[in-house]
Amino acid sequence: MLHNDDPLDAVLRPPPDETQEEAAVREAREMEARRVSAQIDADIKAERQARRKKRIVRLLLLGQSESGKSTTLRQFQRLYTPTAFREERILWRAVIQLNIVRSIRTILYALDPTSSTSPPRRRSPSSIMALAGPSAPPQPGTSADAYNYDNYYAGYNNNYASASGYASDGAVDSDPESDPGPSSQSRFNFDPAPEWEALRARLLPLQHVEALLIARLVPPNEDEPTRLDFGGGLPPGAEVMKEIFVRPGNRWKASEHQKSPANSRSHSRSHSHGSDRDEAQEALTACAPAMMALWADPGVRAVLRRRKVRLEEGPGFFLNDLERVTAPNYLPTDDDVLRARLKTVGVSEYTFEMEVSTGRETGTEWRIVDVGGTTWVPFFDDVDAIIFLAPIAGFDQVLAEDRTVNRLEDSVLLWKAVCSNKLLAGVDLVLFLNKCDILERKLAAGVQLVRYVRSYAERENTFAAVSQYLRGKFSAIHREYSPNPRKFYAFCTSVTDTATTAGIIASVRDMVVRQHLKQSKLL
Ligand SMILES: Nc1nc2c(ncn2[C@@H]2O[C@H](COP(=O)(O)OP(=O)(O)OP(=O)(O)O)[C@@H](O)[C@H]2O)c(=O)[nH]1
Ligand SMILES: [Mg+2]
């Protein structure tokens, strides 16, 4: 049976006995309804356009501790909020001062013939923590994620590299001659030069500088970082030097800002104690000749070499710039800020609008999540992209927090966990094979990748070949473990280098914004 009558049509049809006046009222009402409906449509369109205009882009930075996450974030800030970045440079002076004091302490410790490298401490590799998933999330700002690791040599001596097998092929090789292994507590036989004691005495004021800087940088309710005795004669167990950390965000900067010489000038009138002197900088200026003598001493360098302490490859290395950075009126340069090391703990989101005109990107709000250390939880499925940092120069190093775990192995496992995570299946991935400058120097100095990664076999030990090989390995993991196909980009980076990183960040920005736009058009 066919029904020509549309039930809706029947309802909407004007009543058959409608008078002329009634028809006029009805038509006016219908016209008003159409006008309201058109207005609603226009409002929705305008709102969508406004949202698209003020785009909000979310990026997540992931990677093991010291991989360069915060440095990458600083590069974004340097490029897109240059005024704020420049204004904050003075605040980094305290961090650089602390980096210097810590390097000197590391040398003094190594010069003590009775000191040994501290025993390895076991912890789960990053990926295992990552795979633990949401059941054990680190809460931002709680002590649960406040790792404050033993970082005496910061994993920059590879004594324990052989304790773990590398990745799937288990190919961390060991060198029986230079690798004492975890069981042998190496004691070094050397006669300390008499002048070293004199230098040690001249450097004693640094102990006070360190305490001063820790008090300034670390909020009072944080765990006390362990201090090392500059005079030697350490109590058992005191040989670990914990790394100073801050929680992400601007709190430490805010307190530094108040204390910075530029600001204390205005405070000094109201506070009788206030002064624009920087006590730490004054002490460093006074200690500079002794620090330079220590670092330039060929005997000292020989001991460091024997102990495999490679400060130059480590974070926060400023000993080659002592004259400049210990000058009384020293102001950190952009490069210094990027090279300074301050460990992040916890999870935090940095929001900034691009300050400079970047063409059609002007007005984009960027939210970059910096996840301190290796802890991460798959809470971040609403991010537009992840920048994953794999510091490939660490192929011959072990983790500072666990000297039984090879750094490259740790990165590979974490990458696998990120790629295979189902919650992140729709998130585009950007891989930074980072610290390529160190990798290049290391390979040129003759460190063989094949000793740590057996599958590298007979290939050439050149930067081009090694970086291509590792890039291939990471890409293969992405292909194999990603639940769905997605966009993937890989770059060889040295994120402390401003010139090369600017281009890479611009590509990442364009790509993320393009993807973001595509997504918002689909909405
Ligand atoms: N030479 C060199 N140093 C780098 C590079 N990337 C980072 N660094 C340095 O390595 C150190 C560690 O970098 P961070 O950015 O603090 O590392 P992170 O991933 O934030 O580490 P956590 O806060 O512990 O999670 C810093 O002193 C950086 O200056 C690089 O490509 N080359
Ligand atoms: Mg960090």
Image: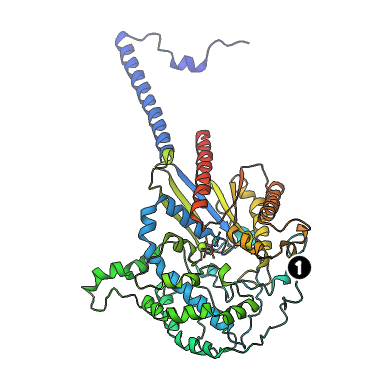
Residue situated furthest left in the rendering: 269
The total of numbered circles placed on residues is 1
The kind of secondary structure element at disc 1 is: loop
Q: Amino acid at mark 1?
A: Asp
Q: Is residue 466 above or below residue 361?
A: below
The residue under label 1 is 173
Residue 27 percent across, percent down from the top left: 34, 15
Query: Which quadrant holds residue 410?
Result: bottom right
> Which residue is drawn at the image coordinates 61% and 10% (left, top)?
2
Pick the front one: 269 or 205: 205
Report the quarter where the N terminus lies: top right
In this rendering, does residue 222 appear at all? no
Question: How far across and how far down the image is residue 494, in percent?
Answer: 55, 56
Residue at the (65%, 68%) spot, across then down? 397
Residue sitting at x 27%, y 76%: 274
Pick the residue in front: 49 or 134. Answer: 49
Foreground pick, 518 / 24: 518
Quarter of the figure with residue 413: bottom right
- Residue 267, can we see it? yes
Q: Is residue 451 left or right of residue 365?
A: right
The correct choice, above or below, for 182 with respect to 398 in the image is: below
Q: What is the image's colouring?
A: rainbow
383 in relation to 394, above or below: above
Bin the neighbour count of mark 1 within 10 Å (Cα to Cα): few under 14, some 14-19, many 20 and up. some
Task: Tell me if the residue at label 1 has its CB under 8 Å from ligand 1.
Answer: no
The vertical placement of 201 against 98, above or below, is below
**Looking at the image, which is closer to me, 7 or 189?**
189
